[in-house]
Image (cartoon, rainbow, N blue to C red):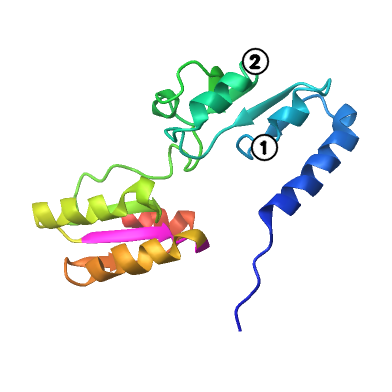
């Protein structure tokens, strides 16, 4: 029996309603839900900002960005800003791994590693081609989001065994550090 999927729009509606009800309780509202909150929050009196985590090179985003010229945004890298340089960027705050978690190994172990999430924009298929081209094994330590199951099964899975690639799956911070040793 297939598990029924929740409707993310319904969850966002409830979340945004709760934010609107309690906005005056906060000094600043910091959102991580892309663009959906902007029409509401720009009308409230509580300052807000948005950290964007998704792709910014999609064709409809420049028009969306133009609609909210004063909305403040935080990037997770300087490169993330390239597709939308005119956005009201107020800061860059790298996220993900603590800087001191992974150390550069002075004794390479003879393999490459891909650490992240399995999706076309992250390029695990490119990592597999690079590893194959240079003749090194590849370890993929990555989450496969439910929305990317088809991409994983049709594009990545067939490449795993034929190219000396091992799929480790999602790993915790300790296991991430172990990949670099």
Q: CA distance from mark 2 to mark 1?
A: 15 Å
Count neighbours of disc 1 (C-alpha within 10 A) and say few if under 14, some if 14 to 19, many if 20 or more. Answer: some
Q: Nearer the viewer, residue 173 or 119?
A: 119
Would residue 53 appear left or right of 130 to someone viewing this image?
A: right
* CB within 8 Å, label 2 to label 1: no
- Can residue 70 be seen in the rendering of this structure? yes
Dot 2: element: loop
Q: Nearer the viewer, residue 167 or 18?
A: 18
* 2 vs 88: above or below: below
Residue 95's x, y, as percent?
51, 37
Q: Residue at x 76, y 28 (%)?
A: 41
Magenta residues, start to end: 138-146
Would residue 88 appear left or right of 159 to someone viewing this image?
A: right
Upstream in sequence: badge 2 or badge 1: 1
- Residue receiving disc 2: 70
Would residue 112 appear left or right of 77 to someone viewing this image?
A: left
**142 is within the stretch colored magenta:** yes
Residue 178's x, y, as percent?
36, 57
Residue 141's x, y, as percent?
37, 59
- Residue receiving disc 1: 36
Q: Residue at x 49, y 15 (%)?
A: 86
Q: Nearer the viewer, residue 80 or 17?
A: 17
Magenta: predominant secondary structure element? strand
Most distant residue in the bottom direction: 1
Q: Residue at x 84, y 29 (%)?
A: 26
Snapshot quadrant of residue 16: top right
**48 is within the stretch colored magenta:** no
* 175 vs 36: above or below: below
Would residue 55 appear left or right of 52 to someone viewing this image?
A: left
Q: Quadrant of the N terminus?
A: bottom right
């Amino acid at each position: 029996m297939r598990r029924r999927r929740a409707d993310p729009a319904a969850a966002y509606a409830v979340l945004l309603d709760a934010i609107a009800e309690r906005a005056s309780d906060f000094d600043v509202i910091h959102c991580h839900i892309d663009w959906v909150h902007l029409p509401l929050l720009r009308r409230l009196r509580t300052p807000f900002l948005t950290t964007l985590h998704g792709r910014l090179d999609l064709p409809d985003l420049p028009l969306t960005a133009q609609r909210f010229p004063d909305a403040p945004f935080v990037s997770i890298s300087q490169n993330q800003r390239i597709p939308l340089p005119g956005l009201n960027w107020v800061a860059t705050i790298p996220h993900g791994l603590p800087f001191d978690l992974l150390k550069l190994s002075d004794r390479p172990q003879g393999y490459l590693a891909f650490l992240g999430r399995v999706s076309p924009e992250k390029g695990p298929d490119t990592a597999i081609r690079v590893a194959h081209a240079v003749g090194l094994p590849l370890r993929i330590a990555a989450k496969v989001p439910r929305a990317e199951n088809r991409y994983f099964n049709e594009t990545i899975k067939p490449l795993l065994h034929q190219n000396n690639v091992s799929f480790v799956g999602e790993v915790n911070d300790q296991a991430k550090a172990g990949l670099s040793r």
